[in-house]
Image (spheres, rainbow, N blue to C red):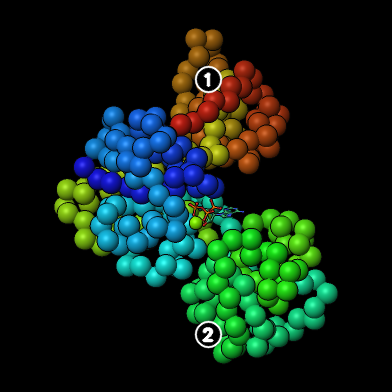
Amino acid sequence: MIRIAIQAKGRLNEESVALLREAGITIEDSKRKLLARSDDFPLEVLYLRDDDIPQAVAMGVADLGIVGLNEVEEKEQEVDTVHRLGFGKCRLSLAVPKADAYEGVRSLAGKRIATSYPNILKRFLNEQGVQADIHEIAGSVEIAPAVGMADAIFDIVSSGGTLITNGLKEVEKVIWSEAVLVASRNLSPEKRTLLNQLLFRFEAVERSRGMKYVLLNLPNDRIEEAIRILPGMKSPTLLPLAQEGWSSLHAVINEKELWKRIEQLKAIGAEDILVLALEKMIL
Ligand code: ATP
Ligand code: MG
């Protein structure tokens, strides 16, 4: 049995649950419970505030955790970051009122900076050799300059829309974050095996993201051209059709390239093109 801590509610909750589900791990639907058991994998889910996840994993209260890299860096707990999960992407940035002059980090010397990430900010300012006053506040950091609580802020940014709404401009991008899988440093051999099984499943799910399975029919004399258009996992699968002189070709294509490839294939005589969703890719 292995125990994973995930965010109880908030921006990472849904995608954490979805990732487990896609990895074949369904969790009893008892939202109100703090701890829930999976029916189909020896795993328990512990629902926590994201702030508490690094410590829970460091203490061994949970063996694993899904949490933003920003929280891992901030909490300075002894955990291993074993895998990047590709969702919850954001950055931690410094921002100042739009009208302020800003000429590099030195402009922040002696200023009051509001943040919920004092440790990351402290490390950054030290590296830059700049001394400033760090004001730790729990939330609504972005309004601090407007109400006179601070001269600058250090906060999570994704699109930058919140900064603009609050009359701020982003002046330094300090760290990039995404959801990561963290693990306790002293897992038993049994738990390490379960972790490896989980990682194997997560990787299969991730690989299939944005990939489509394409089937099409084409005349045999066009196969070579089609293979050049469609570099598959190894090479595309080719099957003869009942109709003489024709074959069916199957390949995996990245969604980003899908339409371009399909247009090229049609141009060389491909017909009956089917595009199917791809669930898992196991190499
Ligand atoms: P909790 O109640 O668990 O303490 P919270 O309010 O601290 O939740 P959320 O706002 O739910 O945190 O964000 C959780 C994590 O999601 C953040 O630590 C960060 O890693 C990521 N995140 C936050 N804001 C964004 C955003 N705008 N875009 C993408 N990811 C984000
Ligand atoms: Mg939090």
Tag 1, which secondary structure?
strand
Residue at numbered disc 1:
247
Other-residue count near label 2 (Cα within 10 Å), few / some / many at <14 / 14–19 / ≥20: few
Q: Is residue 282 visible?
A: no
Residue 252, given in percent of the width and then of the height, sits at 51, 34
Query: In the picture, which quadrant includes the N terminus?
Result: top left
Residue 168, given in percent of the width and then of the height, sits at 75, 67
Q: Residue furthest right?
A: 99
Residue at numbered disc 2:
127
Residue type at tag 2 = Glu
Residue 217, given in percent of the width and then of the height, sits at 58, 20
Q: Earlier in the sequence, mark 2 or mark 1?
A: 2
Q: Is residue 242 left or right of residue 171?
A: left
Residue 110 picture quarter: bottom right
Q: Determine whether 38 is above or below 183 in the image.
A: above
Residue shown at 40% from the left, 58% from the top: 52
